Amino acid sequence: MADEKETCKNPVCGCAPHDGKYCSASCEGTGDTIEIDCDCGHEECTGNF
């Protein structure tokens, strides 16, 4: 079984978490809000449209 890449707990974000859960304060602040676009600001994020 292949190792899965750990990602931010914000479902639309594809970044690696920096604190074990979230990649940024923006993602941490989403709470239970459902987003279609990630606003973390990381250029490599796959959730930015």
Image (cartoon, rainbow, N blue to C red):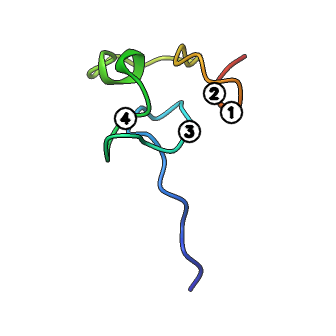
Which kind of residue does numbered mark 1 sit on? Thr
Residue 10 location (% of width, % of height): 41, 32
Residue, x 34% and y 17% (percent of image)? 30
Judging from the image, what secondary structure is the residue with disc 2 in?
loop
The residues tagged by marks 4 and 1 sit, at their Cα atoms, a distance apart of: 15 Å
Number of the label disc, if any, that sits on residue 10: none
| Left or right of 46 on screen, residue 8 | left
The percent position of residue 46, horizontal first and vertical second, equals 68, 33
- Return the residue at label 3: 15
Quick one: label 4 or label 1, which is nearer the N terminus?
Answer: 4
Task: Name the quarter where the C terminus is drawn.
Answer: top right
Q: Nearer the viewer, mark 2 or mark 4?
A: 4
- Write the residue at 27% across / 22% down: 32
Q: Amino acid at mark 4?
A: Tyr
- Which comes sooner in the sequence, label 2 or label 4? 4
Of the numbered discs 1 and 3, the one sitting upstream in the chain is 3
| Front disc: 4 or 1 | 4
- Secondary structure, mark 1, is loop
Q: CA distance from mark 4 to mark 3?
A: 8 Å
Q: Quadrant of residue 14?
A: top right
For the residue marked with disc 2, what is the amino acid? Gly
Are the residues flagged by discs 4 and 3 in contact, CB closer than 8 Å? no
Q: Is residue 10 left or right of residue 32?
A: right
Q: Which residue is mark 1?
A: 46
Q: Can you identify the residue that label 4 sits on?
A: 22
Q: Is residue 9 above or below residue 25?
A: below
